[in-house]
Image: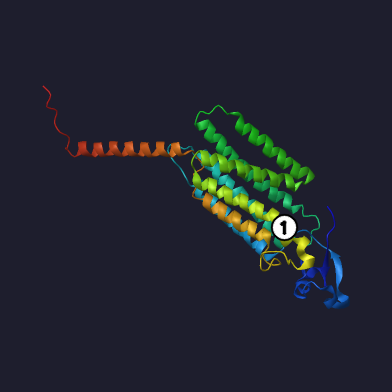
Amino acid sequence: MSNIFQPFSSSPLHRSLYDQDFIDAGCNATQLGASFQFVQLTQVDDTVGTWATNYAILALGVLGAFVFGCMKDPLIKYRRFAFSSSYFGFSGLGYGVAAVNHQIRQLETEPKFYWAAYILTTIGVMALQLQIGMNFKASNNPRHWYSLLVCLVGFAVILVIAVWGIQLVAGGYLVVSYLWFVLYFAVIKDWMASLGSIVCIAGFVVQFLFDPTCGTEAYPDCFQDCFLPDPSTFNHNGLFHVLLILGMFLQLFARFVPIIEQQQQEEVQESEGVRQDSKVSIDGGEVEPNNSA
């Protein structure tokens, strides 16, 4: 990992990523006098907007895990909702671990703490992939290899993160997975799941596109090309997390199962209601007598 040298006007403990005095001086080092120095710093983004929105994703993940964990339907096996619950739970935990890293581990020059966050979010996305595998199985789809492929690819990504720490692999896996979610859930007409996945992808795109103008590369120039009003407090990573929050919130209203199963469930409930009404009529003596000879 390459070293990063950032301007600091005083102690490096003043701020781990950005020096507010330097920013307040218009990023003009000459105004800071002899106390100005370059200090090797971390790559961890400790801006308030970044770690605060990470904690918000954690809270939403816990909520989603609870909602789907308590959901039961007569035609949809409970273990399939367990996969949906795991998606929210592990994703939330992953971003929660990242929040701790952003807020507390500010002076780590090699943030290996991120590895746990990426592994947890990878497991979360794997769970939703396995949800799709269960959908295939329930519909007697011959693609029994799908779940096996999901496990092989997911564990390969986890291995790469744990052994080599290549975070880009995890990011690519998440983006490709969400693209697949958009297509699959649109096909089964789960529009909330598909729309939520689109918003999540938009978050990844925002993070990638605006990193050069709102991230550490733009710090020496006071983020002059960044469209956000105060990137030293709320930057592109914070905006990325806000879009993830919106996407996952939309997914709270999803079902993650084919629409035909919901229709079948409604038909069963209607037929049960008819049978119940018939039973009440018989018990009440309202059945017409049989006039056949």
Rendered location of residue 176, percent (x, y) = 65, 42
Secondary element under disc 1, as helix, strand or loop, is helix
- Determine the residue positioned at 77% across, 46% down: 166
Rendered location of residue 198, percent (x, y) = 58, 48
Rendered location of residue 160, percent (x, y) = 75, 42
Q: How many numbered circles does the render carry?
A: 1
Q: Is residue 240 left or right of residue 276?
A: right
Residue 27 picture quarter? bottom right
Up-down relation of residue 157 to residue 17 (above or below): above
Instruction: Tell me if residue 17 can be seen.
Output: no
Q: Is residue 68 left or right of residue 23?
A: left
Rendered location of residue 240, percent (x, y) = 64, 56
128 or 181, nearer to the observer: 181
23 or 134, nearer to the observer: 23
- Determine the residue positioned at 43% across, 39% down: 262
- Determine the residue positioned at 63% across, 32% down: 148
204 or 150, nearer to the observer: 204
Circle 1 residues within 10 Å: few <14, some 14–19, many ≥20: some
Q: How is the image coloured?
A: rainbow
Residue under circle 1? 211
